[in-house]
Amino acid sequence: IKLKKMKKVILILALIFMANSYAQEQKQVPMINVSGEGKVKIAPDQALISISIETKGTKADDVKRENDKKMDAILKFIKKSNIPSEDFQTQRISLNPNYDYEKKKYSYIATQSVQILLKDLSKYDTLMEGLINEGINRIDNVEFKSSKMTQLQSDARKLAMKDAKSKAEDYVSVLGQKVGKAILISDNSQVYIPAAPRMYAMKAEYSDKETSRETLAIGEIEITANVSVSFALE
């Protein structure tokens, strides 16, 4: 029994010694820690549009029926606009009571929301004008997107790594050393959410002569990747 305990103690000591030796070896590896950033810009070619129809009234059934009627017209218009069925869907349906304490009676608000993925931005003004004509009274959000987002994010990450290595080479070039393999890479990128453009004006604010004006300045989407890299020095 004593022999077994002694062997166990020796094994534990050996493992501790090996762990300490490994830690010391790791600490002795000369390294340089740098950050890198990669940016890619592109004009968006899609828009994610969120719209709503809101109807108010004193009777719940009437309010819901009227709101459903408006939404039916909206969905039919979207289909006529050659938007594929997989590119638009209902997001929210609600019917809520609202109590007026002064009049001491209830009113009701029915809301239906639809999200549309528009893959041809040249149709934006025509689509929005038609939706307003059909009765929408709220535009919740318009988000710019790119159909090439996955590839652009990959390109930005590669540029970030190249930037990190270039920085490391700049630092060590005066020391007569070379940048070796990457020991540790940390992705510090954050999800990019394109800013929404100004909300489209309601029909009542336009005269007949102004309906053909352009209201969308799409600009560019900027995709950014940030990394921290530890390089070994040779």
Image (cartoon, rainbow, N blue to C red):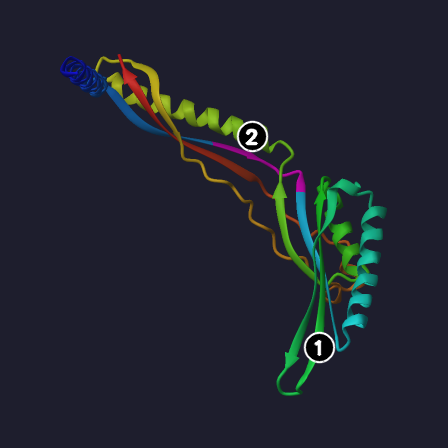
Given residues 134 and 21, the one toward you in this image is 21
Residue 139's spot in the image, x, y percent? 67, 58
**SS class, disc 1:** strand
Given residues 24 and 192, the one toward you in this image is 24
Give the residue type that dot 1 points to: Ser
Q: Residue at x 78, y 64 (%)?
A: 67
Name the residue beneath numbered marker 1.
Answer: 107
Question: In the drawing, does residue 27 fall left or right of residue 81?
Answer: left
Label 2 – label 1 distance at C-alpha? 49 Å
Give the tally of numbered discs: 2
Quarter holding the C terminus is top left
Instruction: Please identify the quarter of the rendering in which residue 51 is found.
Output: bottom right
Give the extent of the magenta segment.
Answer: 39-46
Quarter holding the N terminus is top left
Name the residue beneath numbered marker 2.
Answer: 152
- Classed neighbour count for the residue bearing mark 2: other residues with Cα under 10 Å, few (<14), some (14–19), many (≥20): some
Instruction: Please identify the quarter of the rendering in which residue 152 is found.
Output: top right
Q: Residue at x 61, y 37 (%)?
A: 43
Give the residue type that dot 2 points to: Leu
Question: In the drawing, does residue 153 fall left or right of residue 203?
Answer: left
The vertical placement of 161 against 43, above or below, is above
Residue 125's spot in the image, x, y percent? 74, 50
The vertical placement of 183 against 126, above or below, is above
